[in-house]
Image (cartoon, grey):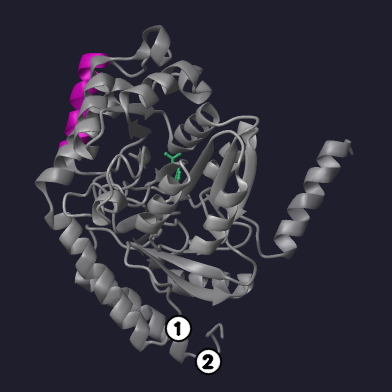
Amino acid sequence: MNPFEQHLAAVLDERRALSRYRVRPHIESPQGPDLVVDGKVYTAFCSNDYLGLANHPDVVSAMAQSVGQWGVGSGASHLVCGHSAEHHALEQELAAFCGRERALVFSTGFMANLGAVTALVGRGDHILQDKLNHASLLDAGLLSGARFSRFLHSDLNSLRARLAKADTGRTLVAVDGVFSMDGDIAPLQEQAALVREHNAWLMVDDAHGFGCLGQGGRGTTELLGLDAQDVPVLMGTLGKALGTFGAFIAGSDTLIEALIQLARPYIYTTALPPAVAAASRRSLQLVTDEPWRRQRLAELIAQFRAGAQVLGLRLMPSETAIQPIIVGADADALEMSFQLRQRGFWVSAIRPPTVAEGSARLRVTLTASHTHQHVEGLLQALADILSDPSKASS
Ligand SMILES: *Cc1c(COP(=O)(O)O)cnc(C)c1O
């Protein structure tokens, strides 16, 4: 066998042995609580479509109409001839919504993080990140060439110590607003104050807060009352609560102009289809016009937490749509996910290396399109699994 084939086969075998082999479920329906997977209908609690907009008729028709007007492909990168009026309008609307001078639309959140971090810091600078940050921020830190250090999760003393040591060049501190696998919110007020004291910059990746948190859905920064001085670099994604695709960085005119000149994952890639930008514009309007979606979500979160606590399940300190149930061992998490599936519920098991060893979990996510009955059904299925000693995992 070729050495590559041999190496890869060994890696795959090891993953299988560890219960870490990943497979892609085949989805045969649009996103929504009733999800068809491999030919069967399940009640799904695993998407990031937090406001239930991925298949909203207005968003669907905005996209269809725009395809009629613009066609499918954007044809080129933004700097060549791919930056359409739809992209431009979306940027202006995002900037106004976030209360920033400008916004820049990227093709994905992964690229927005890579682009912003590598444009802002390099050799001789420092990048400080929360240990539990999203993989795209962590990879961006490595790629930047800046001195990279990770502080303990949401630990202010750990951040303070790292800031004190970062005494050359510029220092960028990057954190998730809402942590994707735990659902907890970063202590941004305290972090922003510390970062300003050290004359550094704070970047917040609000992929899971944008659209969901705060009165107006502006995200974690709105919830915690932070402005552009506190968080000069704000990143949000459009593929989660907005139900579409893409991402953006919002900030000052200078920041955005610099990213247009310097951010390689912005410059050297095809602009996303104009129709996707049009769909995002419609979604953003719904985020403003339909605050009931956030209220519904908050009610379902409260219902789920109360019910899970009665069952004695191990939850995380999360107020957000991400409500993990900590199981522990990888095989137990898989078994629990399998048991739920047999009862008609689709919840994904998250295992290392995505989360720390011994903290495998079921990542339950709630959306505004779930009903109280859906949540009640999930709680009943969990109760059923726990009460059957032959099937219980712990
Ligand atoms: C999903 C996610 C991203 C990546 O966004 P995509 O648009 O899916 O590439 C970045 N950061 C966080 C915290 C995320 O959850």
As shown in the figure, which amino acid type bears the numbered disc 1?
Ile
Residue at disc 2, CB closer than 8 Å to ligand 1: no
Identity of the residue drawn at 74% across and 52% down: 12
Local packing at callout 1 (Cα closer than 10 Å; few below 14, some 14-19, many 20+) is some
Quick check: can you spot residue 188?
Answer: yes
Q: Quadrant of the N terminus?
A: top right
Q: Is residue 219 above or below residue 228?
A: below
Residue range in magenta is: 58-70
* 38 lies above or below 237: below
Q: Where 224 falls versus 243 (above or below)? A: below
Q: Residues within 10 Å of mark 2 (few under 14, many from 20)?
A: few
Percent from the top left, x then y, of residue 230? 34, 45
Does residue 182 show up magenta in the picture?
Answer: no
Label 2 sits on a secondary structure element that is loop
Residue hosting label 2? 389
Q: Nearer the viewer, residue 298 or 384?
A: 298
Residue that mark 1 sits on: 385
**Horizontal side, residue 281 vs residue 273: left or right:** left
- Residue at the far top in the pictured view: 80
Snapshot quadrant of residue 54: top left
Amino acid under label 2? Pro
Q: Does residue 358 lie above or below 39 as drawn?
A: below
Of 388 and 315, nearer the camera is 315
Query: What mark, if any, has residue 310 been given in the picture?
Result: none
- Locate residue 87: give its quadrant: top left
Measuring 17% from the left and 63% from the top, which residue is drawn there?
296
Quadrant of the picture in which ligand 1 is shown = top left
Please tell me which residue is depicted at 59% across the width and 52% down the height of the picture. 162
